[in-house]
């Protein structure tokens, strides 16, 4: 399929995990790319992986929690590619800690990367998306739909991403801009592999986080992102789509 031929997508968090998989999937379907991440080496690796699809690829080393850096990335995308059709806000972090052990700095960092970046990029991209009648796919989480222990800041930011997505979907529907959120559960990514759990956790609470099915691969999440970003989903806006092996259903 070449659902994104002659379209330009900006993908945050593109250096690894789901962001990398999204970039590769969109490139495989013909999208030209602006790849953004704070990890420049990872960006280069993703760009190389996308080059086999003969699409135009740009990279921008970017701290997504910084408004000026987000603005620079949007500007570079439009200057280098001439347009913006799809915004994929994929960048995010997670941390497991007891509530009492979470510092103000950790709370603020979670807000900056998981939530503020989505707002910044959406606000900055919107004039271009209106012009192209494009769309936004935001990566929320199953933790944005149901409670999850030891991740209060993460849950708060992901629930906010769901609500932000719905709000923007309503506000810009008349401008033909769609906005959707994807809510993965457990996914086999480097981010998840490096999670450290706090001492003295309640295993019965933790057990509720795990899905009924085996954990997803990043490519499966990328497939869902590609669907929501494509014209096949033209009648879908304002959804928070779980892709979680039944986590929120149980």
Image: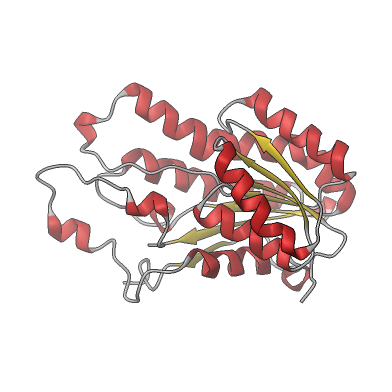
Q: Is residue 229 visible?
A: no
Direction left: furthest residue: 200
Q: Position of residue 87 (x, y in %)?
A: 70, 49
> Does residue 203 sit above or below 28 in this rendering?
above
Q: Position of residue 94 (x, y in %)?
A: 38, 44
Quadrant position of the C terminus in the picture: bottom left
What color scheme is it?
Answer: secondary structure
Q: Is residue 22 visible?
A: yes
Tell me what residue is drawn at x 75 percent, y 73 percent: 232
> Does residue 34 sit above or below 53 in this rendering?
above
Please give left or right for residue 1 compared with residue 23 in the image: right
**Labels in figure, total:** 0
Q: Looking at the image, which is closer to me, 168 or 108?
A: 108
Q: Looking at the image, which is closer to me, 111 or 162?
A: 111
Q: Quadrant of residue 212 in the image? A: bottom left
Please give left or right for residue 161 compared with residue 120 in the image: left
Q: Quadrant of residue 22 in the image? A: bottom right
Q: Position of residue 242 (x, y in %)?
A: 48, 66
Quadrant position of the N terminus in the picture: bottom right
Q: Looking at the image, which is closer to me, 169 or 115?
A: 115
Q: Position of residue 179 (x, y in %)?
A: 68, 54
Q: Looking at the image, which is closer to me, 88 or 250?
A: 88
Tell me what residue is drawn at x 74 percent, y 34 percent: 124
Please give left or right for residue 80 compared with residue 233 in the image: right
Please give left or right for residue 54 compared with residue 248 in the image: right
């Amino acid at each position: 399929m070449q659902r994104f031929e002659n379209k330009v997508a900006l993908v945050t968090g593109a250096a690894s995990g789901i962001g990398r998989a999204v970039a590769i999937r969109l490139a495989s379907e013909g999208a030209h790319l602006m790849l953004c991440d704070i990890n420049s080496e990872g960006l280069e690796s993703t760009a190389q992986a996308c080059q086999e699809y003969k699409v135009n690829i740009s990279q921008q080393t970017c701290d997504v929690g910084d408004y000026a850096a987000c603005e620079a990335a949007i500007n570079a995308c439009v200057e280098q590619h001439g347009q913006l059709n799809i915004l994929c806000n994929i960048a995010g972090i997670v941390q497991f800690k007891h509530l009492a052990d979470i510092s103000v700095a950790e709370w603020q960092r979670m807000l900056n990367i998981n939530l503020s970046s989505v707002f910044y990029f959406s606000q900055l991209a919107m004039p271009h998306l209106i012009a192209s009648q494009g769309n936004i796919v935001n990566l929320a989480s199953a933790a944005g739909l149901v409670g999850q222990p030891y991740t209060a800041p993460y849950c708060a930011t992901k629930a906010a991403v769901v609500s932000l997505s719905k709000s923007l979907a309503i506000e810009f529907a008349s401008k033909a801009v769609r906005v959707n959120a994807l809510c993965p559960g457990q996914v086999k990514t480097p981010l998840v592999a490096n999670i450290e759990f706090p001492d003295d956790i309640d295993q019965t609470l933790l057990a509720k986080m795990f899905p009924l099915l085996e954990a997803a691969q990043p490519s499966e999440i990328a497939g869902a992102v590609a669907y929501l970003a494509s014209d096949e989903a033209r009648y879908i806006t304002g959804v928070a789509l779980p892709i979680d092996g039944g986590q929120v259903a149980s």
